[in-house]
Structures are given as C-alpha cells and as structure tokens.
Image (cartoon, rainbow, N blue to C red):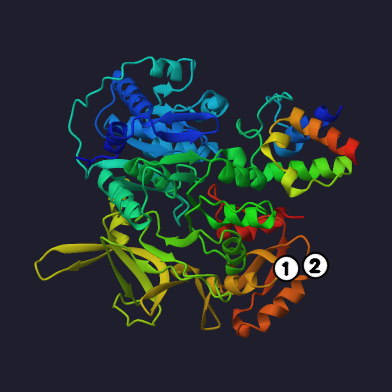
C-alpha cells in the first residue's frame, strides 16, 4: 500500500525496475537505481542519528541529486526543506535557523556558499555531498553510494505526518514555511495522474527548482505513475535555444512551468521547424499567460493540449482549465474548475458566499492542502476560514487571497485581494491594468504596482519590457491605456525597463519594482 | 586577451570586484553559480558591444556560453565568418 511519498519509488522499482526515473543531462537513474540510492541516503542519515521529523536542508542546483535527496530524506522519516542556492546568504541562514536544520545535502560546487552560510547562530553538524568541510562532519556522495542499500525505518511514519516544507516570501518580509504531509503530496500525485492521464510512458519536463511547488509534478506525480522526469538544468533555463533543443531531444510528453519559460522560447523564435510530436500536454501556472503568446505557441504545437493550472503553494494545485482552442481574444484565460477531492467557496469582504458572477475571494478546502505554516499557529489560524457543518465537524478552508468571479461554471482570476487599490474611491484591479497593457503589440511583459504617495493616497505605477523590434514611447503606452481603461485606472507613471526584479522561479516581484527603477539607467 | 577581458567583466561588473574569486576559462559559469540568468544577459550584451557582433537567439546556447573558453571560441568563429 502506498501511503508515504517514498513508497512511490519502491513500487515503481518493482513494476518498472529498468525504466528511467530521473534524467539530468547525460546522467540518469532507473527506478531500481533510484530505490537503491534513496535507501543508501536514508541509511546514511540514520548513521548520523537523525530522528523522526528532523528537518534536512537540500542545498542543490537543479541536478539528479535533488531527486535522491528528496526521497532519501523522506525515506529516513525526516522532512525535506529546499533552500535556494541562488538566494542571499541571510535568507538561507534564516531558513536553517527557523527550521533547526542540522544536516545539509549539497554538491561540491556549493562549497563556497556553504562556508558563508555556516555560522555560530545555526546548528549545522553534518554536510552530505562534500568530501570535507573543516570541523563539520562531511560525507561525500561517493561515501553515500558505498553505503548499504538495506534500510528499514526504525520508527513509524503516517501519511498525515510532515514530509516537506516549502518557504515563500511572507507579506511581512519574513519567509513563511508551508508544511505539507505525505498525504497532501500523494493526493496531488493521484489527482494529476488522473487528470492528465499520466502513465509510465510519459516523459515529464521539470523546469521548476525544487523550492517551487510546480516541481511536485516532476518529483511526486512522475514516480507515482512510473514516468520519467527530465530535470532541466540551470543553464537550459537561461538559454531558450537550448531549452527548445532539450524538449525535442528528450521527446518530452508533458511540460509544466511558469509562462515565462515558454514565452522566452516563443520570442526567440527558436521553435520554428520544431513541432514536438510527442508533446501531449503543456501545463503552465504561477502567473497568467498573455493570450498573444499562448496563441503563437498553440498554433506552433497544434497537437498539444494546454492547461492553465492554478493554486497557491498552500494547496498546491486546486483548479485547472483545459484550453478548448486558440484564445479568441486578449481576455485573460480562466483558471477553470476546481478539481476532484476539493471544495471551494467564493466570499465577499464579510465572508459571506456570493452568487456566481460576483467578485469575491476564493477559499479552498482540499486533500492537497497544507498542514499549516511552520511554527506559526497564529498565521495558520488567520489563513483559515472555518465552518462547522451539521454533524458538528469543523471544515477549514484556506483563504487564497485571490479574487475570482465564477461565470458559466468557470472561475476567472481577477488578481490578488491585496493587489486591489482604491484610487479616489474607485476600486482598481492592478491585474486588469496589467492585462490591458500586455495587449499592446510593443509590450513584451508588463507589471503594474501601487505606491503610497506622501499624502497617503495610492498611485498606480506601471513598468514594461518592450519587444526589441517595436519602438514606442512611454506616453504612447499611457495613451493606449486611456483608450481602454477608466481614467482613474490609468497609471500615473509608466517606465520602460530592460529587466524586472524576479523571484527565483521567474515571477515578477512587483513589490520590488518601486525601488528597482532607481537602479535602472 | 579576449578571455581575460571577459573574466574581468564577470569579476568587476557581475561580482563587484570581489577579490577572493578566481575564474578560469574552463569553469562552468552557470553550473557553479558564478553567473546567473540576468548576469548572463548582461555578459552577452557586453560581448556583443565589445566585439561589434550581433548574436542571434539560436546561437545563445549552452555550447557557446557555458565557459569563457567557449565564448572566446564562438566570438572568433563569428568574426572570421563575418
């Protein structure tokens, strides 16, 4: 019976021992090898006296070791915590201290950064993946792979126990740890396997780093279905031409990423003459996909189905929208319907349900829901909307903070609740302004944000990145918006930039734009 | 020397002159985290301007830009063909 995430590896090792489980560049591991590696790492962690539920940090770039680390840690009855090696040292230290991480799993290329991270304030006592680390115990991967593959967990773990913690930036500026169980992870694996009909024949392109929940398809769904996950390298994420080549060479059948990765591929024209006959599904999530790019891509890959995936990391995925055909206009794509094993409510500001067609906040209760925020019961409590049903059972919905409108059975995403500003009493959805801006032919990407003026009133600001070929001025773009939006919703200022500040997963950091413009010359 | 110039740009412009860094022409710039995505875009721009060449998107690949040595090789090939 499968009730823990590492069971998926063991089961697939029985069903498909010689099929590829994970692939990275020229390295690949079959399910048999993966099962062995996972047990070797789990045994190694127990030789380091790891206890039930201990948090182990994964400090790795995109690499095949990420798969071994994730499953080895969970197989050992511990909890994996991805730490982004590209994040500033202070943020990594915060995570390590916040989670009481004592053991880190890494690679020799990270040694320089690890040296900076280790401090008196944290309790790092062992590093796996380095041959040597001064006074701290270090065990190289060679040592791990020489360990016995016979491993039995000396205690019991339940499906409802903690499996991993993913950190996201909190609105207070302090990252918050989202706790997921084996149960929520497996629920996600089962739901996606069913929804996209994933089998052992699939080859899933994993673009997301492991600290981003989009990676759970490559790392959880794929082993559950016995499929192969092709881990995109950091270098391939940077060069669209190399990414297009990978999609073709690896005969990927499923692709899942943020829109940006695909937009770059479209814009660089590197897909011409590449029709990718094996590609069954393109899933995108994390941000809206501007219809103008989606149309180009869907025309190019006419045999591929496209799905808009929606869900905050707290519930992983919760809705889906299979595009029925080319987007006919530039209206944002719906986020679609709530998937199985999930309930939802749309409520107004007083938390009363609204009738379909009215804007409200989306609340989600799902099998894929988090356990809560790590060591933050107050924040967890605040994030929940609780109802007691007729049997006296309490049902806790997660408040997504996202505004939606339901029309004809489909949910439409309208923006963040806190992304809504009031300008002279008028309510403006910044997301809507952004969606209008992106319809301009010269605009490649747009970000709209608000700043507080000295008199405490809010001002709408916009920043755009232009397509290289088209010349347009800031005033022309504002004029364009004036023709499409009520005057109060037109940004006070618009800046043309060459770059946006972004999160490590490629999302635009709108909150940082206010300061970002200062650096831009 | 072209490779020295590129290494110097990475050290001075992308790393703000951090003195404890050493970059060799054969170092994997992206795999090692020495250069990140935005840094690579700046670096490509620098290479274009410094050598008076225009790099088409299909040439912006791992093979051509993973190491300083690969970049030098690419630039020389492009210049000779131009």
Residue A67 position within the rendered picture, expressed as x and y whole percent measured from the top left: 41, 34
Name the residue that disc number 1 marks.
A442
Q: Is A127 in front, or is A376? A: A127
Picture quadrant of residue A58: top left
For marks 1 and 2, give the CA distance.
7 Å
Viewer-nearest residue: A344 or A125: A344
Looking at the picture, tell me which residue is in the foreground, A303 or A347: A303
| Residue at the spot of label 2 | A471
Judged left or right of residue B35, residue A103 is: left
- Secondary structure, mark 2, is loop
Where in the figure is residue B44, as x and y percent of width and height?
Answer: 76, 43
Q: Quadrant of the N terminus of chain B?
A: top right
Image x and y of residue A488, in percent: 60, 82
Q: Residue at 40% of width from left, 22% of height from top?
A: A126
Residue at 32% from the left image edge and 83% from the top image edge = A355
In terms of sequence position, does the residue under pointer 1 or pointer 2 come before the other? Answer: 1
Whole-percent x, y for residue A275 in the image: 60, 54
In the drawing, does residue B61 fall left or right of residue A412?
right
For mark 1, does the 10 Å Cα neighbourhood hold few (<14), some (14 to 19), or many (20 or more) residues?
Answer: some
């Amino acid at each position: 019976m499968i009730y823990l995430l590492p069971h998926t590896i063991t089961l697939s090792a029985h069903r498909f021992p010689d099929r590829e489980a994970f692939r990275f560049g020229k390295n690949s591991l079959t399910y048999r090898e993966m099962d062995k590696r996972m047990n070797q790492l789990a045994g190694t962690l127990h030789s380091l006296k790891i206890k039930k539920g201990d948090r182990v940090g994964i400090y790795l770039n995109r690499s095949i070791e990420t798969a071994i680390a994730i499953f080895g840690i969970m197989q050992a009855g511990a909890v994996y915590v991805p730490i982004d090696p590209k994040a500033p040292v202070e943020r990594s230290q915060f995570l390590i201290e916040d989670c009481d991480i004592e053991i880190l799993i890494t690679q020799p290329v990270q040694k320089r950064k690890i040296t900076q991270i280790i401090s008196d304030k944290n309790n790092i006592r062992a590093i796996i993946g380095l041959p040597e680390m001064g006074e701290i115990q270090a065990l190289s991967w060679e040592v791990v792979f020489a360990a016995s593959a016979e491993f039995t967990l000396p205690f019991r773990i339940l499906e409802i126990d903690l499996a991993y913690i993913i950190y996201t930036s909190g609105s207070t500026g302090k990252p918050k740890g989202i706790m997921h169980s084996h149960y929520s992870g497996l629920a996600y694996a089962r739901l996606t396997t069913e929804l996209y009909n994933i089998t052992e024949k699939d080859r899933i392109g994993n673009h997301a780093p492991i600290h981003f929940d989009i990676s759970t398809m490559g790392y959880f769904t794929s082993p559950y279905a016995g499929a192969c996950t092709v881990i995109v390298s950091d270098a391939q994420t940077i060069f669209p031409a190399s990414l297009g080549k990978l999609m073709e060479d690896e005969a990927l059948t499923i692709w899942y990423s943020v829109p940006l990765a695909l937009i770059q591929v479209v814009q660089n024209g590197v897909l011409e003459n590449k029709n990718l006959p094996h590609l069954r599904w393109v899933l995108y999530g994390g941000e809206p996909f501007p219809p103008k790019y989606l149309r180009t891509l869907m025309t190019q890959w006419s045999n591929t189905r496209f799905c808009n995936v929606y869900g905050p990391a707290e519930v992983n995925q919760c809705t889906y929208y299979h595009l029925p055909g080319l987007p006919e206009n530039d209206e944002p794509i719906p986020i679609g319907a709530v998937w199985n094993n999930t309930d939802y409510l749309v409520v107004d500001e007083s938390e009363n349900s609204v009738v379909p067609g009215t804007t409200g906040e989306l609340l989600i209760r799902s099998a894929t829901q988090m356990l809560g925020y790590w060591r933050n019961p107050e924040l967890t409590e605040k994030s929940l909307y609780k109802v007691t049903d007729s049997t006296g059972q309490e049902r806790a919905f997660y408040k997504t903070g996202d505004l939606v409108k339901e029309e004809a059975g489909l949910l439409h995403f309208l923006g963040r609740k806190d992304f809504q500003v009031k300008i002279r009493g008028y309510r403006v959805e910044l997301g809507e302004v952004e969606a209008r801006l992106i319809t301009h032919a010269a605009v490649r990407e747009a970000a709209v944000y608000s700043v507080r003026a000295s008199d405490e009133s809010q001002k709408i600001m916009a920043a755009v990145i232009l397509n290289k070929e088209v010349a347009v001025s800031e005033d022309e773009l504002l004029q364009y918006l004036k023709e499409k939006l009520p005057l109060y919703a037109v940004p006070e200022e618009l800046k043309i930039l060459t770059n946006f500040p972004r999160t490590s997963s490629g999302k635009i950091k709108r909150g940082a734009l206010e300061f970002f413009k200062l650096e831009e010359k | 020397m072209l490779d020295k110039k590129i290494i110097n740009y990475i050290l001075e412009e992308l790393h703000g002159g951090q003195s404890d860094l050493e970059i060799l022409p054969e170092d994997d710039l992206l795999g090692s985290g020495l250069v990140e995505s935005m840094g690579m875009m700046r670096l490509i721009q620098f290479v274009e301007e410094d050598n008076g060449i225009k790099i088409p998107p299909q040439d912006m690949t791992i093979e051509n830009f993973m190491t300083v040595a690969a970049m030098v090789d690419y630039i020389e090939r492009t210049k000779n063909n131009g």
